[in-house]
Amino acid sequence: MGGRYKIREIIVLHGKWARMLLCATLLLPSFLFADVIYLKNGQKIVAQVTKEDEKQVYYEADGGEFVLPKSLVDHIKKSSLPPTVPGQESVRPSRDVPLPITPPVEVNVEEGSAVIHDDAVDEAYLTRLTDDAVRNPTPENQHKLKQGFQAAAVFMTHKGDPEGAILKYREVLKYLPHDSGLTLALGYLLWKQEHYLEAVDLLSPEADRYPQSPNFRVLLGSSYYGMENLDQAITEWTKALAIQDNAQLREAVIRAQQERDVSSTYSELRSEHFLLRYDGQQNEKLSGEILNSLDGSYQDLVLDLDYSPSEAIVVLLYPNQAFRDITRTPTWVGALNDGKIRIPVSGVTQMNPDLARVLKHELTHSFVRQITLGHCPTWFNEGLAQLEEGSTTAAMGSQLARALASGKIPAYASLEGSFVSLPADQAILVYAKSLAALEYLRDTYGMGEVRRILRQMPSADFPTILQDELRMGYPAFEDEVATYVLKKYGS
């Protein structure tokens, strides 16, 4: 959910494409761990070292950017591998929620070589490690057990099976209860998969067991934040700050306090899949209509994408000014999905088709983030969200066809990252081109292929997926979509 995160700017084009709504959403990019930081306590951190000075080591790992005191480091082994996936850029972390000050330690690939064979976990080997540790619980056997299961969990996570990795961590913790490293790794993965209640149940006793470790308090607070329990999130983060100061954590506390101050009087509506909070002075009838619309869109997306998020999705309806104060977004941002769906609704008195499309668009991004673990090219994500909300390229088909024929729109390979630097006139065409790609995939291969592509994203870059699934590279895909559009709209 990658070291840093990319901001997506979503342009939802309604009706005749006459109105442009920009929404900011956050994605977790792919990340290639390149370096190994060897700590003096014998542990290793597999990450990308970005900078060193006399006192600190700066590095990127799966939770974001971190700083490690140089006094804890024995040595660093640099890799010659490229540090990031081509075409991706570094920006600020997603959700503005703090992660452990020191992230969970990942095992070295070499240490996991006995566990992974033929691109799969050797379950028989794990069983032998378990039997040895149970029959003869020496420190050596317990260390081998921990390393084996951790290697399996890391492998499964990188292969796009975080739920399987969660099961591995739970299994090994039966034999090594209260192991701080394994517990933190499991808590982090539960948070990342948005299993917030499970994370709270796991981390609450361990935070008391390890009172000098800020990491448990940080993750516990982040899990409470995901559940919209702002009071408890602030309490846990404040406890973590008392143990170790951290600028991102201080900022998170301030923002959570602002959110709490704004929403302390908000009312709540709940359904099986959503927790919706709204200003008590706003129209309760509208909030109920919004919840009903979300529930309907949820069922549509379950059918279309063959996936159901595991926990309730938080939706916050704000007065316009409160939305600006909380999100700190510019005036052109019309909604925000930062792990919670945030929408300004001042002046809206009843459900209407435009609002329904915005809701489904944002909800699509929530589904995509969970399905792909955040590893989705922006153009694909935006195209799918527009497709699901019911937009089509028909209204500006001729203009799109001319632009594609003249080569005036950037190639898909260059649109995997943020669209923020695009001029407004080009942005409209880029979003139309994104939608055209998803229309092409749906009409040519069916939604089943779209689902298969989504499920490949956690473990492979998009050019590899294109080759494996469609037997073509990016240039050929570019040509195929252009031909599709020109056939439909070209003169």
Image (tube, rainbow, N blue to C red):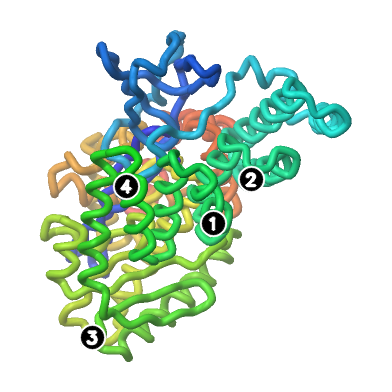
Q: Which residue is mark 4?
A: 433
Looking at the rendered image, the disc whose residue lies closer to the viewer, 4 or 2, is: 2
Crowd tier of the residue under label 2, counting other residues whose Cα lies within 10 Å: few below 14, some 14–19, many 20 or above = many
Contact (CB < 8 A) between labels 1 and 2? yes
Q: Secondary structure at mark 1?
A: loop
Distance between mark 3 and mark 1 Cα atoms? 30 Å
Distance between mark 3 and mark 2 Cα atoms? 41 Å
Where is residue 464? Give x, y as percent.
53, 29
Crowd tier of the residue under label 1, counting other residues whose Cα lies within 10 Å: few below 14, some 14–19, many 20 or above = many
Q: Earlier in the sequence, mark 4 or mark 3?
A: 3
Crowd tier of the residue under label 3, counting other residues whose Cα lies within 10 Å: few below 14, some 14–19, many 20 or above = some
Looking at the rendered image, the disc whose residue lies closer to the viewer, 4 or 1, is: 1
- Which quadrant of the structure image shows residue 343? bottom left
Q: Secondary structure at mark 4?
A: helix
Label number found at residue 447: none
Q: What amino acid is labelled 2 in the image?
A: Ile
Q: Which residue is mark 3?
A: 282
Where is residue 413? Give x, y as percent.
36, 32
Q: Which residue is mark 2?
A: 166
Q: What amino acid is labelled 1 in the image?
A: His
Distance between mark 4 and mark 3 Cα atoms? 38 Å
Query: Where 425 sits versus 395, above or below?
Result: above
Q: What amino acid is labelled 3 in the image?
A: Gln
Q: Which residue is mark 1?
A: 195
Distance between mark 4 and mark 2 Cα atoms? 38 Å
